[in-house]
Image (tube, helix red, strand yellow):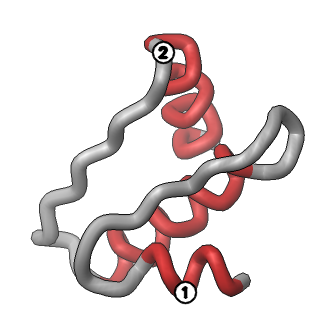
Amino acid sequence: VEAIISGIQPGLSMVVGPPGTGKTDTAVQILNVLYHNCPSQRTLIITHSNQALNDLFEKIMQ
């Protein structure tokens, strides 16, 4: 919850952690809150690989 609250604040946010700690789920929740509360806001998503970005998009579409 703390990471999500931090992620919706203005400025840069990074979600960092070892595998299996919920980084993708946290990012999905942050993006969900931003989309529903600030639909015209632009958001930049950077991942370490194309597969990580694909995984994020798959979870967003669920």
Q: Is residue 62 above or below residue 30?
A: above
Q: Is residue 22 left or right of residue 50?
A: right
Label 2, on which residue? Answer: 49
Q: How many marks?
A: 2
Residue at (36%, 74%) from the top-left corner? 34
What whole-number distance in Å separates the C-alpha atoms at marks 1 and 2?
A: 25 Å
Q: Is residue 58 left or right of residue 2?
A: left
Question: Amino acid under label 1?
Answer: Ile
Residue at (33%, 43%) from the top-left corner? 45
Callout 1 secondary element: helix
Task: From the viewer's side, name the closer residue of 60 and 24.
Answer: 24
Residue reaching furthest right?
20
Question: Amino acid under label 2?
Answer: Ser
Q: Is residue 24 left or right of residue 31?
A: right
Rendered image quadrant of residue 36: bottom left
Q: Residues within 10 Å of mark 1 (few under 14, many from 20)?
A: few
Q: Is residue 10 above or below residue 62?
A: below
Q: Position of residue 31 (x, y in %)?
A: 44, 62
* Badge number at residue 5: 1
